[in-house]
Amino acid sequence: MRRALAELGRGLSDVVFPPMCVHCRGLVPSESEFRALCLRCEPQISRVTPPHCSTCGHPFYGEVEGERLCPHCEGLAPAYREGRTAVLLKGAGRSLVHELKYHRGVHVLADIETIFRQTPHVLELVRGAWLVPVPLHPRKKRERGYNQSELIAECLARAAGGETRVAHLLTRQLDTVSQTKHDRKTRQANLRNAFALAKGASITAERHLVLVDDVFTTGSTLNSCALTLRRAGALNLDVVTFGHG
């Protein structure tokens, strides 16, 4: 009954407010599995599957034998164990992230959750873990109205199910400038001492923690968060992002 009512509500809403594709701005038909991507644009999502870099999650193409260096995270020296991602930040995947991050498009979260549900190599890493979203500075969170990494972590927790939960263990104490156009060295300098353990947060060495962010670019933000958790005693620590690029 609840499912039938939800489908009815969705149908009525689509009649009054026809959903538009965030990538091509065309209409999304009711038979589409996605609510923010049309049938033509959904296949343009660049989904990541193994084999992939164990540090940043970027896929390796072709035959892979033995160790392979990844140019996307070379020189990072990660303070975490492993990183995985669901999509590459291009095409329709990029449009989903930008709609959420820059246009207050929280309606895309349903599609982000669907993509996570269809990404087994991410789900197997996070199932049963505490998901720690990368925090925003309070000023930026007030301006945006939400922390997109926190919302993505909630999507991932629902997709993984079981005892997977979101844990707010970190705060951002420095209001740093946007890192979008900076290289890794500059980002690392800007992020030094930017994060701290949240008041009252408790870290146990055996607890599986997974840092969650919207995008892996150079890994500097995630690694700064990982270092903060390491200093607090975390030993079982991984990283997941929705996109890479």
Image: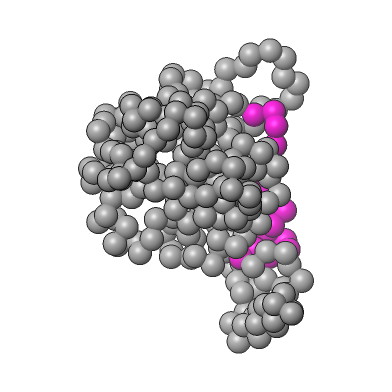
Instruction: Out of 51 and 121, give the one closest to the viewer.
Output: 121
Determine whether 211 is above or below 44 in the image: above
Quadrant of the image for the N terminus?
Answer: bottom right
| Residue depicted at 34% across the width and 43% down the height | 201
In the image as oriented, which residue stretches furthest toward the left? 174
Instruction: Out of 181 and 112, give the one closest to the viewer.
Output: 112
| Residue depicted at 54% across the width and 67% down the height | 107
Residue 45 visible to the viewer:
yes
Instruction: Out of 98 and 212, give the one closest to the viewer.
Output: 212
Q: In the drawing, does residue 55 fall left or right of residue 161?
A: left
| Residue depicted at 30% across the width and 39% down the height | 197
Q: Is residue 69 magenta?
A: no
Determine whether 4 is above or below 117 in the image: below
Q: Is residue 41 magenta?
A: yes
The boundaries of the magenta stretch are 36-52
Determine whether 155 is above or below 164 in the image: below
Q: Quadrant of residue 83?
A: top right
